[in-house]
Image (cartoon, grey):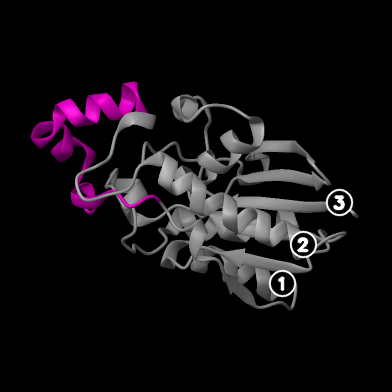
Amino acid sequence: MPSTTLYLLRHAETTWNAERRIQGTLDAPLSERGARQVRALVDALRDVRLSALYSSPLQRAMETAQPVVSAHALAVRVADGLREIDQGEWESRLLDEVRESDGARLQAWWASPDTVRMPGGETLGEVQRRAMRSVFEIAAGHAGETVAAVGHGGVNKTILLALLGAPLASYWRIRQHNACINVVEFDGDLTRIITLNETSHLRDDTWHPLA
């Protein structure tokens, strides 16, 4: 079977990223920096021959995906499995607020992320299972083609860890900056990660959010 190349992207910066506010499944618009990052992402992918582009249904991912597909005369295809981890009661709250009200669980999230469920939210294992179903469906549907998918920091990390055969306990060992580019090649039973967290196209607009 011909190989499939997947450009796995993270959405651009939002106003909540800039505030260090936890987003999860809630929507927040792109910031001014995020708008610049999208333009840089469009330029970086302009010469890539994309056959399709998939996106998480969340607003920040769709706002990142739409200018990219427009540049390639494509339409966004929604992949629900790419939506961000549901962070339950933590969503919409500042990181410092969570530290004050739920400090022990937050500390466990930093120390052993694979063992924690946010109150009312998902585990990383649950996220990884749905995300990988979407990724393998996308790859299988585009043999011999190059496609892109716009996800989120958390969900992208679970995908990359699965493809590397690494445990979810290593969640914090991978960075996913806003508007970064990962390149993955699916070649039969073999998967190769060609590029991880590429941000050279962003110049001074790289952001390092925790959530």
Comes first in the chain, label 3 or label 2: 3
Residue 50 screen position, x and y as percent: 78, 64
Q: Is residue 101 above or below residue 5?
A: above
Q: What secondary structure prevails in the magenta region?
A: helix
- Disc 3/disc 2 C-alpha distance (Å): 21 Å
Q: Which mark is residue 3?
A: 3
- Foreground residue, 59 or 124? 124
The type of residue carrying mark 2 is Arg
Please indicate, yes or no, whether residue 155 appears anywhere in the rendered image.
yes
Instruction: From the viewer's perspective, tell me whether residue 39 is left or right of residue 110.
Output: right
Report which quarter residue 27 is drawn in: bottom left
**Percent position of residue 24, x then y:** 33, 52
CA distance separating discs 3 and 1: 24 Å
Which residue is found at the position 21% from the left and 50% from the top?
Answer: 120
Mark 2 or mark 1: name the one nearer the start of the chain. 2
Q: Residues within 10 Å of mark 3 (few under 14, many from 20)?
A: some
Q: In the image, is residue 141 part of the stretch drawn in magenta? A: no
Q: Position of residue 189 (x, y in %)?
A: 80, 42
Instruction: Tell me if 73 is positioned left or right of 144 in this view.
Output: left
Q: Are marks 3 and 1 in contact (CB under 8 Å)?
A: no
In which quadrant is the N terminus drawn? bottom right
Pointers 2 and 1 in contact (C-beta within 8 Å):
yes
Q: Amino acid at mark 3?
A: Ser
